[in-house]
Amino acid sequence: MRQRKLVSLATSIAVALGLCAMATPAQASETGSSPLTLSRDADVVARFGFGSDIHIGRSSGVYGTALEKFNHALQTYASLNVDAVGFSGDLTNNGKSSEYAELMNAISTNLPSSDKVILSMGNHETYDPGMAQASARFKSATGQDMNKLTSVNGIDVITLGPQNSDSDYRADYDFLHTALDSISSRQGYAPAQPIIVLTHHAVQNTAYVSNEWHGNYGEGSGQDLVALMQQYPQIVQVSGHSHATLEDARSIDQTLGYTSIQDGTIGAYFENESGKVDPSSGDGATRPADSELSSQGIIVDIHRDGTTEVHRLNFATGTWIYPQEPWIFSAAEARNDKYGKNRSSSPAVFAHDATVGFDTSATSTTKAVVTFPSAQAADDTNNNMVHSYAITLTPASGGEAVKKSVFSDYYYADKGTSGIIPTKKDQWSVTIKGLQSGTTYTAKVEALTSFQEQNALPGASIGSGASTVTTTEAPAVARKPILDVNYGLGNADDHYQHVSAKQGTDSSIVEDASLGQQVLSIKNSDGGYRYAMTPADYEAIENGFTTDVMFSLPDVKSDQCVFSNQQVSGYGFEVENGKLEFWMNPADGSKPRPSTAISANTWYHATAVYDGSTVSLYLNGDLVSSASAKGGLKIPGSGAQYFFVGADTSSSGTPEYQVKSGSVALARITSQIFTPAEVLASHGNVVDGSGSSASSITAKSAARSALESTKDTYTQGQQDFTASSWTAFSTAYDDVVSGLGDFRTEPGALSTSAASLVSAHSALAKAVDTAALQSLLTTVKAIDRSPYTAESLKALDSAQTTAAALLQNGAMTQQDVDAAVKTLQQAVDSLARIPETPNNPTNQDGNHNSGDGKNTDSDKGNTANTTTNGTKTSVDAPTSGTSDDVPSGASVESPSKQLAKTGAGFGVIAALSALFALMGGMLVVTRKQRF
């Protein structure tokens, strides 16, 4: 009898990442790496190590890669003296040859050559090669047939793989029938001796979570594998696919009269039932918190008398799961449903003074954070494990209560241990979404065991007493279009400019004669487009949206996504089993899936509307199915915020569930919530009565072309356009934007809006520049009128009045303004000075003139300041001459400033004035002398 030590994966990964030193024996109990052994009784004829969902090719972050987890699991199985290991599918993440190579290298490196390895194929093995080639690649890479009968120390093991679609086992019926006949007709056949059936998918409604994650085993058909297996109560069907936590006692089930076991996941993440929320975000969650820490499996001992003993193992913590309670059963006990769905359990216990509280600092319009202490299980037995907490918030003034549930932390490490695996909590803080704004709530928390939840039985509960929480008032929400992709326009661009990326190599935009437009054609599961979304996009549609897609597929049986962004969140249009389904993941954790039957090679316009509480599916404008969906849309993680046309997104943004072959015409999203009448109108706008979408394409093309040709003008703003022409243009532009953004807009109305925009753009008129005229009028008002003749002033006044009146005329043109500037400037330049009289140095205005009483030529238009008899005379305008034409926009200097430029003539003028005065005196003297 061999006994070997078991070390936790947490320690192995932590050491590899440098997170802690290798544990010494003294430290072992603290790190969760204490040596574990499993003795092997002498009557154990075969010991198996089983696991599934390895997913070579993916990573769990700090908890290690799938390969690291697998290496550790293999080493652990080898240390526990197994005769064989078996892995029930999803060995790889995508079925790539490189992933298979890593898988097989890990097996050969970590297992003794004497240990037998039994592999079955899962749905992920079909992703890269495609369904048709998946089994061939599986055999080429592993050296094993997908379907086979083998034996380990006399214990028969049968493996089955999906065919036709990645969860369909009906085609395996004949093989299973033949294998079971072969076993049962064997000489010495012992009906009590277990027969292991290794499959990836469970039969529906058997082991934990198989009500949601299961395969098609042909129940009720001529290929009913379930009815076949029910003839053999010694069958132990070991399956994976669900990734469910093995701590849940429902992981074994015998309600069908034989044994079904789900064996967890080795290399991926935990994923349990729907209907729960994530404690931190409040979003719906089938994955419990810290789900990536998962790495679990089982040891199966087959005793000589046919008794089967199953031990559950947590590789991450290096511990046995409920070691005091291995599952032990015989074929007879399986037939009698020893491990059924109605196992008894006792309520958990809260501390006597425990109450529910609220973190009021985290309250918003639609969410609150509830706090409460952990409950203690009634005892250490598996059936009494606290599986979940049900939380109910009830409006204090009456109304519909909001009910949420969270997974308990039963899969965490025990308190007091250290390392990278979280330890069980003393206190909980849970975000509850989907509340009404401006509402006061009380709270209740109920601790439930697996079987209390399974059978709707009450658990231990505590309340908030007098404590309440009140949500804030909701602000108004502006609903708007988000994504608008129309391949009929000849490209794959989104009108709202989300970045697109072509997927694969086998898709193109081609003409479709039946639809009368271009469409995206996808072939060989290798095409489509990806559109990168933003957090703001998801925020806009979180509490309501309308989305639609137009498509035609030649195969409506295979599982394929037409327009989708699902990854335990988001939503998507999916086709399978002859139905169109709209998968939605609301924050309440439910998985509503309204659906309707469709036919191959037929164009369909599918629309889904979510109003915050109900999701409805429409086909060609008609309502076909609805389902409850409360709490708002669960938003995908940052790595999966992509909408795919022709596929769904993986958690890392790569395509999966791709369209095998088919065509897509359009895909759209808006945060507007359409009424049934508006959905019908939208359909009529997409496809006319003849089934053609040509008119819609023509209208959209015209509208987008009009926007493109006028976008620069609109972006630059009004600038120098007249107010009236700009208002007409900007209104027309906004109308086209609004029309394109509302899927309800009729093609005719959109075409009219586009034509109006083009017309308004052509009619834009430049605004008139009046700055020069206004400046000149200001100058004219400041002119000293006293030195000038009445006649010249009259001409100036006339030009000034005409110019001022023109400024009040809204219909003036630039040509009118330029002409008014020219006329007014000429009037200024033509101002004539009043003549001076002889022997009277002072004229009627009191100004001094030159000594001879006459203005010389040098006085005309050239004198700015003249000093006569010691008195300075100010002249503010020229008296003769005309200016050059003043161009539009030119500044006009005051006459005094113009004259100041001739300052060089000041001395000459003064000298002439003195000379004239002297000559006058001489004449007087001469005349006196004559007489």
Image (cartoon, rainbow, N blue to C red):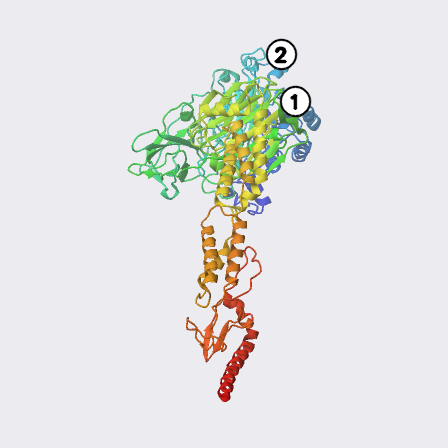
In the rendering, at what x and y percent does residue 287 appear? 50, 33
Q: Earlier in the sequence, mark 1 or mark 2?
A: 1
User: Residue 262: where, in percent of width, then height?
Assistant: 53, 25
Element at label 1? loop
Residue toward you, 411 or 515: 515
| Mark 1, other Cα within 10 Å: few <14 / some 14–19 / many ≥20 | many
Q: Nearer the viewer, residue 578 or 531?
A: 531
Percent coordinates x, y for residue 760 in the rendering: 53, 38
Please determine whether, in this image, residue 594 is positioned above or below residue 422.
Answer: above
Which amino acid, by three-letter code, is at mark 2? Asp
The residue nearer to you, when weighing 887 against 34, is 887
Q: Is residue 714 above or below residue 163?
A: below
Q: Which residue is mark 1?
A: 146
Q: Is residue 842 left or right of residue 907?
A: left
Q: Residue at x 45, y 41 (%)?
A: 415
Q: Which mark is residue 181?
A: 2
Residue 647 is left or right of residue 250, and the answer is: right
Could you tell me how far apart the alpha carbons at marks 1 and 2 are, in whole angstroms?
A: 19 Å
Q: Quadrant of residue 341?
A: top left
Between 470 and 752, the one lying in front of the other is 752
Quick one: label 2, few (<14), some, or many (20+) residues within 10 Å? Answer: few
Picture coordinates of residue 220, whole percent (x, y):
53, 12
* Secondary structure type for disc 2: helix
